[in-house]
Amino acid sequence: MTLYHFGNCLALIYTPYYFSYKYSGLSEYGAFWKCIQAGGIYMFTQLCKMLVLATFFPFTDNAENPDLISEFLKSTVDLADIIGMYVVLAGIPGKGHSKVLTAGIGWATAEVILSRALLLWVGTRGQEFDWRYIQKCLESNVSLIQHISTVTLIWLWSRHDLQKTFKPIVTGLIVFNCYKPMLLDLLISVLLTGPWTALLIKAFVTLCVGVVTLQIYAGLAQAIGIY
């Protein structure tokens, strides 16, 4: 039972990442090492964020009365992810869809390996089944969509041929993605929802952002012929 649970969680968390790489055409572009490079930049970015958080925002156990200003400033540190993704995009040659998918999948894969691998190895090998790990796996799949959407927004923002009417929308969505974890956690704490409902809320919001991003990207791609 323990081995079955562990294998089930591994398949649930990593299969969408593999299929995204395999069937998006990235394997034909030889993008594997670019994904590795994106993962390296991800690790460096997270190290910088950890140093900033540990220096200016030491951990305090105050979950019952969180300081909103402190949480806002902590979420502001996530702007470093935007810089890291921009650096990844700048270092990837090729067309728009290959750049976006390579950066997004590479970044998301590095995150899921560093943040979920040890958790699954320690947790799912226990004697008792726990739905918490299934929820974490599904949440990682939501993160894949979020990272690809964020990278797409950064690519759109960097384009000089993006219509001016879309520029505020793209900028607003980038900023929203930075503060989305804080906002969703605040909403979930107010609604007092369970873990499954919280997961559905996160998935719904991420899907909405992804659909809007896809519409803007599709319009620009069709206009300049980068499919």
Image (cartoon, rainbow, N blue to C red):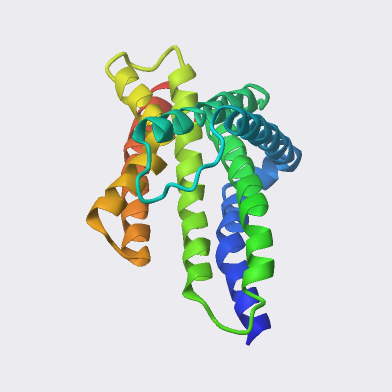
Q: Residue at x 69, y 68 (%)?
A: 121
Q: Quadrant of the N terminus?
A: bottom right
Q: Is residue 140 left or right of residue 111?
A: left
In which quarter of the view is residue 48 placed?
top right
Q: Of residues 173 and 127, which is closer to you in this image?
A: 127
Q: Residue at x 64, y 28 (%)?
A: 88
Q: Is residue 22 left or right of residue 65?
A: right
In which quarter of the view is residue 161 placed?
top left
Q: Position of residue 18 (x, y in %)?
A: 63, 57
Q: Of residues 158 and 13, which is closer to you in this image?
A: 13
Q: Position of residue 84 (x, y in %)?
A: 60, 27
Q: Is residue 150 left or right of residue 29?
A: left
The residue at the far bottom in this view is 1
Q: Of residues 105 and 68, which is closer to you in this image?
A: 68
* Whether residue 21 is situated above or below residue 209 in the rendered picture: below
Q: Of residues 70 and 21, which is closer to you in this image?
A: 70
Q: Is residue 136 left or right of residue 120?
A: left
From where the camera sits, is residue 222 visible? no
The residue at the far right in this view is 33
Q: Residue at x 47, y 62 (%)?
A: 138
From where the camera sits, is residue 34 visible? yes
